[in-house]
Image (cartoon, helix red, strand yellow):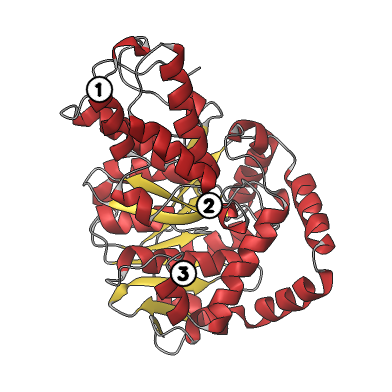
Amino acid sequence: MATSISNCIDKNNEQTLHLISTQFFQMVPVRRIQWGEKSLCLGNIGIEDQQAVLEATVSSTLCNKYPTSLSYRRAFVKYLIQKLEDSDVELCDEIYESYTDLLQETEEEEDSLCYKSYFLPNKEIVNLQESVHIISQGTTGLSTWQAALHLSEWCFEQESLLKNKNVLELGSGLGFLGVALCKQCKLDSFTFSDFHPQVLFLLMKNIEINFLNEQYSLECPTFLENSECKDRKMLKKIKRQLSVSKELVMEDSCEIMQISYNSMVSSTDTMEREVDEQEVGSEQEEEVSNSNDHFLSSNSHWSPLNNSNVYTLSHSDSIRLMKFNWEFCNQKDLCKIQPDVILAADVVYDKSIIPFLVQVLYQFLSGTFGSWPVAYIASTVRNEDTRDHFLVALGNKGLRYEILDPPSEKIFHYDDIIPIEILRVWHPSNKTL
């Protein structure tokens, strides 16, 4: 149960407002939001304090540009109203006006994708468009997972390991880890990689949102008018499919993660087939076969690196993106990357993909492509048998590993009831260690 709002909130209390806003923009379930250090009743929170909370959350410029989901904003303001009314406190008019405006907004496909914003120690902000679902469209890649947040905190504290290094991330998902590190740390280059076509599309757009000088939103009409027709079609298709299997955003994420991955994928696939099966099927076939060319080669913001399938962002050679299928590795493309450090978060969740993941790690770590990188892999240990299977596979390939100490400071808001481990993995022939 969330603690009560502290009566010490005021416009000058930046720490308290920052605590509330960071949770709001990460869409922490409202019943779990921490409202301050003290556990006091709402009886003393004044009009100005209420206005300050609104200005830091639903009424902020950031929320206007990168809005959290409509259902979450409604739940947040409703919770605030209920708690204040229960305490017999006079409410400011802005709270009721805000809630009325939110109720009048149409909640359709648009709420299946929303923005989450993550505040970094250096005051930079990572803005990502994510799915409100944990598992959707047969992939876990449309949401930011706890292990990525945990690994980023560890990397911030171990910045010297990444300084002036070429970093490759396996399974970038929506790009939180890479975007955060590029903004917080001094890297030589960072290569994002993923394979699922719709994940790759949103990953590309999230990178553009965070690093291009153009100030646009994926929801902005100007951006949609200037986008290619296929881009608009893809974005609408993703939203339509997500809306089919829509779940309440306030649902406990730990409970969702305990559901069998295979059963979730199966049920999602079934629902997708029931919605315009012929159109969806034909579009998916076209997207899978042509996704790399469509997403990257036809996009004016990206350029191929030395005629490879590795693409660089137009304004910076240091930010790269690659479609990477672990099962069918393109040796030519992998030779272009030459990473010093390999990162991965929450990629050890299914035994069937572990052999391909371990083979990729072995190829890089054994110096096959000319460098001798070290890998750091963060995993939420939901199933010890799967984790042990991964460790055995590493050993069978002759790779060494050790479990590292967790970060000393927690920056982001996420459940850590289920343990998260960070492994360092390297080849015994690596002379740099």
Q: 283 or 257, which is in the foreground?
A: 283
Tell me the residue at 40%/60% (across/down).
373
Name the spot of residue 369 as percent of width and height, x first. Answer: 45, 73
One can see residue 387 in this view = yes
Q: Amino acid at mark 3?
A: Met
Name the residue beneath numbered marker 2: 399
Name the spot of residue 367 as percent of width and height, x first. Answer: 45, 67
Name the spot of residue 139 as percent of width and height, x first. Answer: 65, 56
One can see residue 339 in this view = no
Q: Which of marks 3 and 2 precedes in the sequence?
A: 3
Question: Dot 1 lies on which element?
Answer: loop
Name the residue beneath numbered marker 3: 204
Tell me the residue at 26%/32% (across/down).
52
Query: Which numbered tag is attached to residue 9?
Result: 1
Q: Which of marks 1 and 2 precedes in the sequence?
A: 1
Q: 145 or 366, which is in the foreground?
A: 145
Tell me the residue at 31%/71% (across/down).
212
Give the CA distance from mark 1 to mark 3.
Answer: 39 Å
Looking at the image, is 308 positioned above or below residue 417?
below
Q: Amino acid at mark 2?
A: Leu
Q: Amino acid at mark 1?
A: Ile
